[in-house]
Amino acid sequence: MKEMSRARFLKTLLAGAMFLPGAAAFGDAMDKLRGDRVGWSRLKTTSPAWNRHSNGDPKLTRFFRDQTTLNVDPVWYAADVENLEEMTKYPFLFSQGVHVVNDAPGRANAAEYIRRGGFLMVDACCNPTYTPDFDVFLQQHRGFFAAVLPESCFVLLPRTHEVYRCYFQIPNGHPPHTFMSNVYDAKKAAHGLYGVMIGQRMAAMVSVSGLQCGWESPTPPPGHDAVCMRMMVNIYIYAMMQGA
């Protein structure tokens, strides 16, 4: 990845180990620890919903800056799945869903991006208009990764997985879930996080949590937006630690 190496990322992150995770802000002392600037980018696909909830991304990047030692660019970016050069500018790409990538060039780019060390994070929108069935969404992604990365394995992450405690402690080893109009969906809530493994390396993660729906604006219960952003911080940090 061109923007920064994972080794330099870890050096930057660990420089802030003297601070307690979750502290409100580290002020001037924290700014001195910031290293390479990292960018938050969404994967652009043919889906009309590829940038849904992107209005909330500056809120997420501010959270990164306030809660970690990372120099996250406040501007969110887009990387077109049809342009491998754009994709490889970012070691981490966020997506509404890659199952919609059906053309050969786009699929080849997704596979090459991952094989070069990139990480894809897929998070389903909680709105049934965009994700009508969460079980189907998961099966679509299981099929996508099996097709473009036949060497990979799609697995449910255990509650003891490091992603739930690598920075923030996520209660019960289970991701928070955002529900449409705050109507609880037990079927959806039963799902944890799913990893796409290539050997010992996690190359992608798939979620039906609707984290992006939760962080865009405060939704009941109070503080839910922060809970969703904590989970995303953990996912980002864990992803960047892969292969460092």
Image (cartoon, rainbow, N blue to C red):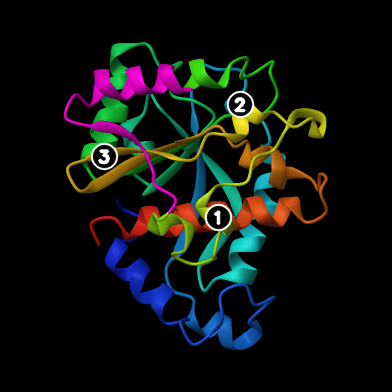
Q: Secondary structure at mark 3?
A: strand
Check disc 3 and report the residue beneath it. 197
Residue 220, percent from left and from top:
83, 45
Left or right for 8, reference 72: left
Mark 1 and mark 3 residues within 8 Å of each other at the beta carbon: no
Q: What stretch of residues is rendered in magenta?
A: 138-159
Kind of residue at disc 2:
Lys
Q: Nearer the viewer, residue 11 or 144?
A: 144
Tell me if residue 183 comes above or below residue 146 in the rendering.
below
Q: Nearer the viewer, residue 117 or 82?
A: 117
Kind of residue at disc 3:
Met
Tell me if residue 75 comes above or below residue 54 in the rendering.
below
Characterize the local packing of mark 1: few (<14), some (14-19) or many (20 or more) Cα atoms within 10 angstroms: few
Decide which of tag 3 and tag 2 comes sooner along the chain: 2
Foreground label between 3 and 2: 2
Tell me if residue 35 comes above or below residue 26 in the rendering.
above
Characterize the local packing of mark 2: few (<14), some (14-19) or many (20 or more) Cα atoms within 10 angstroms: few
Seen at 31% across and 25% down, the residue is: 145
Seen at 40% across and 27% down, the residue is: 81
Decide which of tag 1 and tag 3 comes sooner along the chain: 1
Kind of residue at disc 1:
Asn
Seen at 54% across and 43% down, the residue is: 77
Decide which of tag 2 and tag 1 comes sooner along the chain: 1
Q: CA distance from mark 3 to mark 2?
A: 25 Å
Check disc 2 and report the residue beneath it. 187
Residue 153, percent from left and from top:
25, 32
Would residue 125 be visible to someone looking at this image?
no
Left or right for 130, reference 40: right
